[in-house]
Amino acid sequence: MTEGTLPLWAEITIAVLVLAGSIIALLGSLGLLRLKTYFERVHAPSVIATMGCWCIMHGTLLYFSMQGGGLAIHALLIALFIAITVPVTTIFLMRAALFRARRSGKDVPGSLSRIVSSDERDS
């Protein structure tokens, strides 16, 4: 094995992981086109971006680790950052969209805090 080549099993594994991550990301993008409302559309890219990112991260981690530079922690840190920030920003965007929709009088689900507080009063 020379400096720039990897064993066949590693190349196949890396290719499958990166291809799987790319296909998952493509499915999330198609969800943006297919779904109609913002509340439906927001789920496809947020969940899919995290799943696709983790597949690509595993392929990257395997590739750079096998190239001889030791364990490639940078790929893991990037994926960890995405796994933390994507759900948090999605929650904030959904809350802002719900607030805006309620203020404009659109038909959206009611606030859970009102349901919980009325249930507490009944008991």
Image (tube, rainbow, N blue to C red):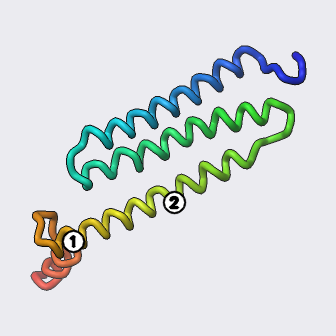
105 w.r.t. 82: above or below:
below
Residue 30 horizontal side relative to residue 67, left or right: left
Left or right of residue 73, residue 55 in this image = left
Q: Which residue is drawn at 27% across and 66% down?
A: 97
Front-lying residue, 118 or 94:
94
Label 2 and label 1: CA atoms lie apart by: 24 Å
- The residue carrying pointer 1 sits among few (fewer than 14), some (14 to 19) or many (20 or more) residues within 10 Å by Cα, namely few
Residue kind at label 1, given as amino acid type? Leu
Q: Where is residue 36 in the image (x, y as percent from the top left)?
A: 21, 46
Q: Who's the residue at 25% across and 55% down the image?
A: 39
Image vertical order of residue 55 relative to residue 1, above or below: below
Residue beneath the point at 59% across and 56% down? 81
Circle 2 sits in a helix, a strand or a loop, which is it? helix
The residue carrying pointer 2 sits among few (fewer than 14), some (14 to 19) or many (20 or more) residues within 10 Å by Cα, namely few
Where residue 16 sits: x, y (%)?
58, 23
Residue 76 pos. (x, y %): 67, 47
Position of 68 relative to 92 (above/below): above
**On the rendered image, what quadrant is the N terminus found in?**
top right
Task: Return the residue at label 2.
Answer: 85
Q: In the image, which is nearer the foreground, mark 2 or mark 1?
A: 2
Query: Residue lying furthest right in this view?
Result: 2
Q: What amino acid is found at the position of numbered circle 2 in the picture?
A: Thr
Q: In which quarter of the image is residue 57?
A: top right
User: Residue placed farthest to the bottom in the image?
Assistant: 121
Q: Quadrant of residue 106?
A: bottom left
Task: Name the residue tied to disc 1.
Answer: 112
- Residue at horizontal 17%, vertical 75%? 103
